[in-house]
Amino acid sequence: MSFSDDEVARYARHLVLTEVGGPGQQRLKAARVLVIGAGGLGSPLVQYLAAAGIGTIGIVDDDAVALSNLQRQVLHGTADVGRPKVESAADAVRDINPHVAVETHRLRLTADNADALIAAYDVIADGSDNFETRFLVADRAEALKRPLVTAAVGRFDGSLTVLMPYEDRDGARNPRYRDLFPEPPPLGLVPSCAEAGILGAVTGILGTLQAAEVLKLVLGIGTPLIGQLLLVDVLCMRFETIAYRRRR
């Protein structure tokens, strides 16, 4: 897989990294990553994946851009209000990097369509804003043996982990999402972003961290957050990592 002169210049800072170089940049160019949600988490996630040169980015979202989104969903601008988020996001990706292919899926992920979507990509990144989707994505990614980078945010905090429960590590099977959260909380127990509010930069921090984990997985470098839950508290700018393991 060769690079054009434009790509060589564009990815110059990657190419000088011994951990990336030409072979690593080729892996990025060949990769297919599915991003679920083009909102607060999905915005920086998609931006950094596009800038890094991920060859194909799939974007799943059934919503339209609202004015209240713009405080944190930086993929979209004022002129995009009312447009489908996947269309606005696709335009943003093309503006960032014309060498990246974008596949838009304007739909809500359900049990009926999840398998076909997830199976078509190498790595899944979940930036959805509801527990129903998070559990569905985690269950189906496990069944289809796709690595999943999943994050969630609150008012001033967030969390991030990497799931590859179909593989072993140190003689033991990697943990599942349900080892962290056995069941979704009762409906209405956890307030939505609209109800509780959120500091916009929180989604920027967690979405960027998601992008870093996706890139590490594609490149095969570093230590992914498998069996580790990263907790970020922005009010006191504290980062903590909690280990968790397979329950059974």
Image: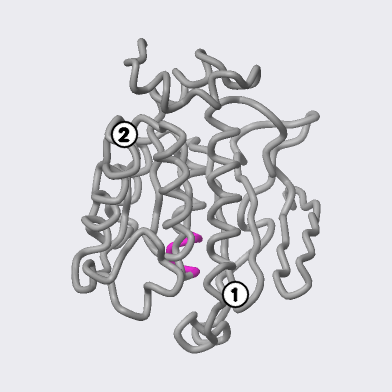
Which colour style is shown?
one colour
Q: Amino acid at mark 2?
A: Val
Residue that numbered label 1 is attached to: 154
Q: Please report the residue visible at 36 percent of the width from the left and 80 percent of the height from the top.
A: 68
Q: Secondary structure at mark 1?
A: loop
Front-lying residue, 176 or 59: 59
Q: Secondary structure at mark 2?
A: loop
Count of numbered labels shown in the rendering? 2
Q: Please report the residue visible at 42 percent of the width from the left and 57 percent of the height from the top.
A: 43
Dominant secondary structure (helix, strand or loop) of the stretch shown in magenta: helix
Residue that numbered label 2 is attached to: 100
Q: Could you say which quadrant of the image residue 62 lies in?
A: bottom left
Is residue 188 within the magenta segment? no
Q: What range is drawn magenta here?
A: 131-135
Labels 1 and 2: the sequence-earlier one = 2
Q: Please report the residue visible at 48 percent of the width from the left and 21 percent of the height from the top.
A: 25
